[in-house]
Image (spheres, rainbow, N blue to C red):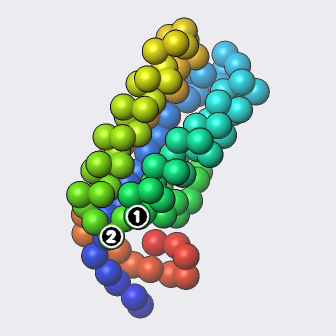
Amino acid sequence: MERRLATVVAMDVVGYSRLMEQDEAGTLQRLKDMHSSLLAPAISGRGGRVVKQMGDGFLSEFPSVVDALQCAVDIQQQLSARNSAAPASRRLQLRIGLHLGDIIVEGDDI
């Protein structure tokens, strides 16, 4: 069993069920767009990697807690700018949590 110290960042969309109920196709498209144009570039740009996506949840891993925290701040700032032009009922907002500790590695999964 391989273990290593890492920072894990977990993200999920606030009110995802409500958003899907109101506009399933639009919400799914906005989520995909957010992942490809904001989340994935921000994570890789700070030295992290996307481990998995589960519905409205994202799990990523960083070797540095400082880079993970800065990535979270970057994402929240960029998302806030994007949301400023959108009606409140269509905004995608993220909850982001960070955890620093030993992880167990199994292939590409943690």
Residue at 71%, 32% in the rendered image: 29
Residue 5 appears anywhere in the view: yes
**Numbered disc in front, either 2 or 1:** 1
Does dot 1 land on a helix, a strand or a loop? loop
Eyeballing the image, is 69 above or below 28? below
Q: Residues within 10 Å of mark 2 (few under 14, many from 20)?
A: some
Q: Position of residue 7 (x, y in %)?
A: 31, 64
Q: Position of residue 102 (x, y in %)?
A: 28, 75
Residue 56 relative to residue 83: left or right: right
Residue at screen point 41% across, 39% down = 75
- Please tell me whether residue 40 is drawn above or below residue 108 in the rendered image: above
Q: Where residue 52 sits: x, y (%)?
A: 56, 59
Total number of numbered discs in the rendering: 2
Measured Cα–Cα span from mark 2 to mark 1:
7 Å
Q: Who's the residue at 39% across and 78% down the image?
A: 104
Which numbered disc flags the more N-terminal residue, 2 or 1? 1
User: Mark 1 is on which residue type?
Assistant: Gly
Q: Nearer the viewer, residue 41 or 56?
A: 41
- Residue at the extreme top of the image, as rendered: 87
Label 1 crowd (10 A; few <14 / some 14-19 / many >=20): some
Check the image and name the residue furthest to the right. Answer: 25
Q: Are marks 2 and 1 in contact (CB under 8 Å)?
A: yes
Along the viewing direction, whichever of 92 and 21 lies nearer the viewer? 92
Which quadrant of the figure contains the N terminus?
Answer: bottom left
* Residue underneath mark 1: 47
Q: Position of residue 58 (x, y in %)?
A: 51, 50
The amino acid marked with disc number 2 is Pro
Instruction: State the image quarter where residue 26 is shown.
Output: top right
Mark 2, residue position: 63
Picture residue at 42% right of the left edge, 63% below the top: 48
Q: In this view of the protein, which residue sits in the foreground, 91 or 1?
A: 91
